[in-house]
């Protein structure tokens, strides 16, 4: 039976990085993936331009930007493999990139450049990659120290096994629950998993009211409890999307309301009073139309149902308008789920992993890296940085 020092399950961002680093240490590494191509999520990421890291995805700045039952868990790997280190790799491969906004770095050209870079690095490190190969069974080998894997093509053994099979998002692209199954099989705990960075949906009645807004985008501050994101909000025919919504979706829970500030950094009361002073005869819809996209203004005016001229509005009515503009409360009923979620929240419980190496505490030789672990970043390159950093950390130890 062929034997490898390290077998990595999953040729995604985290798995390829782990393989490269283990290979560079002289370990004989095999990467196994059931997909036809490596790095399929990298290929489609960032709208095809791969938002490959965020300059703020560092241990000190990123403290509150990674969700986990133990948000401190990610800091060790993030401090050992920093965005600068990945940027240096990108530059060494001559890949042009730019900062879009909020520290988000994107390729100037296609995302496939990142895959080509990782595949090149794997080749240089002597890593073997087998695609279109499934995993049928995994167990301890005869010695009890290593692992035996029954693949769809052959059986192999290895000393270290790195599980980098990702989360549940986008099953159409090959996401499976294999990582969670293996964690359970080897006695590691799992935290609850749910879709993250995902559009939110509404019940039919609310959708009916919002349907005319489909396609409209506006800058907003969207909040859930004390967590708030200021970015674009997009109305869709299913509900709400756009970066502000994707971000808040990772914090939102079924039944919770979200509040939308439609006039970020503006004093809504002042803005309305200024219009009232200049044009007291205007109807509310027209007043709001001067501040917001017209169809949105119409919807808010309909919801407020305050007829008459703005000049006649009492202070109470003005306060109601102001409240609507600064904290429009919406109650999503659900999310689009794993079908479109960019990430899976939750996963392998970090209590059962070593933060420095990502090794299972009670199963020598077993590692979990990337999205399968209960660490989820904000939108904007944080999730890839976690994939690189956790893969890198395991690659030093596997
Ligand atoms: P990943 O899912 O990448 O890889 C897992 C691998 O395991 C896959 O190749 C899969 O085929 C394989 N696998 C799964 N089950 C298997 C099985 N049973 N047998 C064999 N192989 C198996 N993040 C970011 O930072 N910037 C961005 O721009 C984006 N953009 C983006 C867009 C879209 C549409 C999505 C869905 C996601 C993003 N993300 C992102 C998130 C990012 O893609 C994600 O966090 C990383 O890909 C996670 O890397 P992993 O290597 O952990 O899993």
Image (tube, helix red, strand yellow):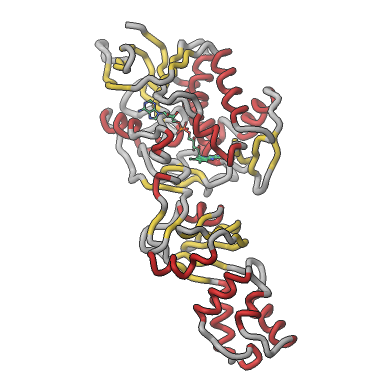
Q: Residue furthest top?
A: 1
**Does residue 137 sit above or below 250 in this rendering?**
above
- Most foreground residue, 197 or 79: 197
Q: Residue 213's spot in the image, x, y percent?
A: 54, 65
Which residue is found at the position 46% from the left and 70% from the top?
209
- Residue 148: image quadrant is top left
Q: Residue 39's spot in the image, x, y percent?
A: 51, 28
Which residue is found at the position 38% from the left and 43% from the top?
346
Q: Is residue 105 left or right of residue 78?
A: right
- Most foreground residue, 214 or 260: 214
Q: Is residue 249 left or right of residue 288?
A: left
**Does residue 369 sit above or below 129 in this rendering?**
below
Q: Is residue 256 left or right of residue 142?
A: right
Which residue is found at the position 41% from the left and 44% from the top?
339
- Most foreground residue, 211 or 182: 211
Q: Is residue 203 left or right of residue 140?
A: right
The quarter of the picture where the C terminus appears is top left
The quarter of the picture where the N terminus appears is top left
Which residue is found at the position 27% from the left and 28% from the top?
186
Q: How many marks?
A: 0
């Amino acid at each position: 039976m062929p034997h490898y020092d390290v077998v990595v399950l999953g040729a995604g961002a985290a798995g390829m990085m782990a393989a490269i680093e283990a290979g560079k240490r002289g370990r004989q590494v095999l990467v196994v993936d059931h997909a036809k191509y490596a790095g399929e999520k990298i290929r489609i990421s960032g709208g095809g331009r791969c938002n490959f890291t965020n300059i703020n995805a560092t241990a000190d700045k990123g403290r509150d930007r990674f969700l986990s039952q133990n948000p401190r868990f990610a800091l060790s790997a993030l401090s050992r493999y920093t965005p600068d280190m990945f940027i240096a790799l990108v530059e060494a491969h001559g890949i042009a990139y730019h900062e879009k906004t909020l520290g988000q770095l994107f390729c100037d050209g296609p995302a496939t450049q990142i895959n080509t870079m990782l595949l090149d690095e794997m080749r240089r490190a002597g890593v073997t990659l087998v695609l279109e190969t499934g995993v049928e069974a995994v167990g301890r080998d005869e010695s009890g120290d290593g692992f035996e894997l029954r693949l769809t093509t052959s059986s192999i053994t290895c000393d270290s096994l790195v599980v980098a099979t990702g989360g549940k998002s986008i099953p159409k692209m090959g996401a499976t629950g294999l990582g969670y199954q293996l964690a359970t099989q080897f006695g590691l705990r799992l935290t609850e998993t749910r879709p993250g960075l995902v559009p939110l949906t509404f019940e039919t009645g609310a959708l009916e009211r919002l349907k005319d807004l489909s396609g409209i985008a506006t800058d907003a501050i969207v909040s859930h409890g004390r967590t708030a994101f200021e970015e674009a909000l997009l109305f869709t025919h299913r509900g709400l999307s756009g970066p502000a919504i994707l971000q808040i979706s990772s914090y939102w829970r079924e039944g919770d309301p979200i509040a939308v500030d439609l006039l970020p950094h503006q004093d809504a009361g002042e803005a309305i009073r200024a219009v009232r002073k200049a044009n007291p005869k205007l109807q509310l819809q027209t007043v709001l139309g001067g501040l917001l996209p017209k169809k949105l203004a119409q919807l808010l005016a309909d919801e407020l149902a305050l007829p008459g001229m703005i000049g006649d509005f009492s202070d109470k009515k003005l306060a109601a308008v102001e409240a609507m503009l600064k904290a429009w409360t919406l109650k999503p009923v659900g999310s689009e789920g794993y079908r479109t979620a960019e990430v899976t929240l939750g996963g392998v419980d970090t209590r059962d992993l070593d933060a420095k190496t990502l090794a299972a505490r009670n199963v020598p030789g077993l590692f979990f890296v990337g999205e399968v672990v209960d660490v989820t970043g904000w939108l904007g390159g944080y999730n890839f940085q976690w994939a690189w950093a956790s893969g890198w950390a395991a690659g030093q130890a596997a």
